[in-house]
Every structure is written in structure tokens, then in C-alpha cells.
Image (spheres, rainbow, N blue to C red):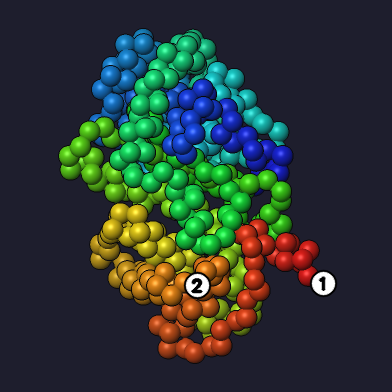
Amino acid sequence: MRLLSRAALPLLFAAGGAAAATAPSPYASDSRIELLGVVQWLSGERPDLPADPAYRDAVEQAFAPLRGHPAVSLWRDGARKRGKMDGRAIDVLYFSEPPALAPRPGWAPPYLDDPAEAADFAALLPALRDFAKKSDFMRFHKRHEGDYRRVCAAAASELGVADPLAAVSRYVGLDLEARARWLVSPLFVPSGRNAYITPYPDPETLPAPGEGPFETATILAYVPGKGPLGDIVTQRHRAALWQEPLFVFIDPALAAFDAARGAPAEDYYGPAVAACRRDGADCAKNWIVAALSARLDVGAFGAPSNLPDGRDPRRDEYVAALSARLAEYEKDRAPGRTLWDFMPRLMAVFPEKAGLSPAAPALRRVRDVKELFPGAAKAAAP
């Protein structure tokens, strides 16, 4: 994963336009995402979800003459090739607001590791700049600031959590040293690649976390109105409220736990889980995040947002066991006790299910998530 320079960290959301700059809520609009919303709408490659009617009609009236613009065809081609793995909306957040969309020194968009995708994005950027200039997009954006504020307020009300980052921090019991935004659009619909953390908190590639905050971005598709479809989308978004802040904790916490544990992974997790941890999508990490999301859902909404669907019985089994263990943490949590303090008990789920009984590692006390990184631990050592 590519990382950004430390100096760039505070700027990820700074160029999102007036609505994002003035909103005290973590739910914000962003001019870059709204530009993509227009281009996506004109391309005909927008997923089949309802759009905010008034805003959709305003976009059609203002931008229909540009349906043949290269930015529209380039977006259409990329959407067809990438499908649910289209990360261009997140990548655009690493540039300044329209029409400049200027690259920032030291910034590296996260979803451009594939040379073909990088070449496609390099072609899309100048087309987006030209589209924004020819359409006078920022004038349109300024006129519709009220729409963006309205949709953000509606999304916050329907999701029912005033500050998801604060809720995660309280549950974990540590300062996450992070800033988080959930970007809401009346028109744009993101793919499955709708979130990222900057810099990514993987201690293997980021041994020292630096001085700036972790910045998390999650793009949400707003579906207006009530009814079954709106309820389904709201449930999915509720599950997305916790994910990025949880990874800010789990990535360094799991690495620090394994370093303290010391023994080979097979001797703790068993061969099957040890193998799936090495396959590029660390199953243990993702199962823990799923269990944590379920417990946060229960606390906020009374029930989990994403129920087991039977497609991966092993995942469902581990998530259920981890969730039950987290319920112990909630029930018996003493003042000042953190999830990091509880990690030996939580992680014991893995050797228990593998029929193993290794000794629990001794963990040092930490005050915030950055103290979990090896560089910070080394600096703190006598």
C-alpha cells in the first residue's frame, strides 16, 4: 500500500468545498465527489439506486449538453472495466478541488498500483479538469450548497450516530489519533472501494506513525426517502460507520499482539487460520472488525446491521465467537480498561477453536493507538 508524506496528512478533506468546510458534523459533502456524481450520471453507469430528485433534475438540466464529453466516456469505460473494484472516487480525494484537481507533492492515491489503472486515471484527470472548466461546475456547486447540507443532515439523522469516530474511540478506550469523514452525495454512488485511511496504519509499511492524525474517508450513497430500499441502504451504511476507525486500531493492535506473542502463527491460530491470514486478506483481522462492528451496532441500534448469510460458515462461526467474547469485555469492563488490555482474552478465541492452549502474551500498557507501532515502542523503551 502506498503512503503519503506526513506533511500532507491534514489536507485530505481541506479542499472539499464550502459545505465540507463549515459543517461541524463528520457527515460532509465534497466538491470532488459531486463532480464525479455529475460525470457518473451522464455516463449512464450509475448503479440503479434512487437519486435525490431535485438535485438529479438540476444536474440533467445544467450538464446534459456535455454528455459526449471525454470525461464522461472515460468514466463509463473505467466503470465497466472495474465494476465493484473502482477506486477512482477515493483516488480523486488526493487532489485539490475542481477545476484545478492539482496533485499534491508526496501524495499517492491508494488504488493505482496496477499500471493499467494508473494510466486510465492519468487520462481521466485532465478530462475532469476540462469538464469542470467548460461546465463552470464550481458555480453550480456553489448554487447547490443548500442541497448538500440538506442531504448530509438527512443522512446523519437516518444513520443515528452523531460521531462514529468518537463511539469507536470510547469502545476501544484509546485515543485513535484520527480524523474521520463520511462523505455523502445526493447523486454519486461509490463502488465497493469506497474508503481508505491515510497513512494506512500497517506497522510493516509504517513502523513509526508520525505526528499527524490518521485521516479516514468513507463515501456513502444517499438514498432519499423511506421504504425497503432505503432501509437496506441505511443498514449497509450503518455497518460502514465503524469500519475505517476500527482498522486504525486493529491493524497496529494485531501486529503488536503477534509481536508480543512471539511463537509461529500455526502454533497460536492453527494451520487453517494461519494460512488464511497470509492470503492477502487477513481473515483474523477482518473477522475481528466484523465482530467489533456487530457489537457497536448492538450498542447504537440494538441489533447488528449485517447478519450472517451462510456464504462463509467459518467466518460466521468465528465472528459469533468473537462477538460473544466482546460481550464479556462490555459486561466486566472496569474503569480505565481498554480493548488492548482485553486482547489476550479476545484473541484466545483462535487457539481455543483450533484445539490449542498457548500461554497468553504479556502486553505493555498504552495510552493511544500510536503507542502500538513498533517505532513508538522502540522510542519509549529505556
Circle 1 SS class: loop
In-front residue for pair 165/75: 165
Q: CA distance from mark 1 to mark 2?
A: 29 Å
Q: Which mark is residue 334?
A: 2
Seen in the image, is 226 located left or right of residue 159?
Answer: left
- Residue at far right of view: 382
For the C terminus, give its image quadrant.
Answer: bottom right
Seen in the image, is 103 located left or right of residue 91?
Answer: right
Circle 2 SS class: loop
Mark 1: few/some/many CA within 10 Å (<14, 14-19, 20+): few
Residue 33 pos. (x, y %): 46, 29
Could you say which quadrant of the image residue 226 lies in? top left
Which is more N-terminal, label 2 or label 1?
2
Residue at horizontal 48 percent and vertical 25 percent from the top: 19
In-front residue for pair 31/79: 31
Specify the amino acid type for callout 1.
Answer: Pro
Number of the front mark, 1 or 2:
2
Could you say which quadrant of the image residue 5 lies in? top right
Q: Which residue is mark 1?
A: 382
Mark 2: few/some/many CA within 10 Å (<14, 14-19, 20+): few
Residue at horizontal 55 percent and vertical 67 percent from the top: 336
What is the count of numbered marks? 2
Specify the amino acid type for callout 2.
Answer: Ala
Residue 60 pos. (x, y %): 31, 15
Seen in the image, is 79 located left or right of residue 305?
Answer: right
User: Is there a contact, CB below 8 Å, between mark 1 and mark 2?
Assistant: no
Residue 285 pos. (x, y %): 48, 65
In-front residue for pair 193/73: 193
Seen in the image, is 359 located left or right of residue 293?
Answer: right
Residue 212 pos. (x, y %): 68, 45
